[in-house]
Image (spheres, rainbow, N blue to C red):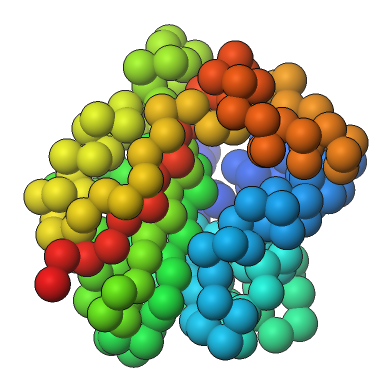
Amino acid sequence: MAEPHRELNDELDRLYAVRFQEDERASKTRLWRVICETFFSRYVPQDGCVVDLGAGYCDFSNHINARRRIAVDLNPDTARFAAPGVEVVRSPLEQLSEVVEPGTVDLAFASNVFEHLPNPDALLKVLANVRTVLRPGGRIIIMQPNVRLVGGAFWDFFDHTLPLSERGMTEALEVAGFRVLECRARFLPYTTKSRLPQWAFLVKLYLGFRPFQFLLGKQMLLVATPVD
């Protein structure tokens, strides 16, 4: 008898368990601890509220210092990997403003999330929800593959559906009512399986020395704030 049809959102735990083996997850956790402490902490007010969009294994929300940390994802495994103090909400990002109180978030963070959305309309809907939950002057940080740099390798992951360059992401933000404050076409390598150095002091050196990013970076980084 044929297997019943399954939606991808119902298989996220299985998909990511296959994609990231236990030793890889441990290495990824160590890597994100350094990235958060060395780089992303500068964007986060310690007395503020952060929302980790598509949090996955909570690599960002587990390692960032903030008064309130909210991890939003459809993956049922997210709650299992969340550190103490991280609030986990299982919800589509298109419904973010229904599960997070409007006007309460200082920073929304999206790492390797938007390339999984089905189309540009879905991206604009998510950005509208983010805009609703942000406080005045709040920010969104977006890190994701830059299709202009990764080329055909973008399709190496079968759940990648929305290819964007930093120019397309800037345009989407502006259409959604954001102003881009910072835009880097090259930031981190395409995946944690690639040539990003894993030792803490090398990661810190990479993050502090932009020429390394120009050489190896294939993920974009954008920081934006809602237009008043």
Residue occupying image coordinates x 65% and y 22%: 212
Instruction: Name above or below for residue 158 compared with residue 53.
Output: above
**Which picture quadrant has residue 45?**
bottom right
Q: Position of residue 107 (x, y in %)?
A: 44, 70
In the displayed structure image, the side of residue 80 where residue 2 appears, left or right: left
Q: Position of residue 147 (x, y in %)?
A: 38, 21
Residue occupying image coordinates x 77% and y 55%: 33
Q: Position of residue 226 (x, y in %)?
A: 22, 66
Pick the quarter of the image with the C terminus.
bottom left
What is the number of callouts on the image? 0
In the displayed structure image, the side of residue 76 where residue 135 appears, left or right: left
In the displayed structure image, the side of residue 41 where residue 226 appears, left or right: left
Near-viewer residue (195 or 185): 185
Q: Can residue 96 be seen in this snapshot?
A: no
Instruction: Name above or below for residue 180 compared with residue 131.
Output: above
Q: Can residue 66 be seen in this snapshot?
A: yes
Near-viewer residue (12 or 45): 45
Residue occupying image coordinates x 68% and y 38%: 208
**Which picture quadrant has residue 166?**
top left
Q: Residue pushed farthest top? A: 152
Q: Position of residue 175 (x, y in %)?
A: 10, 50
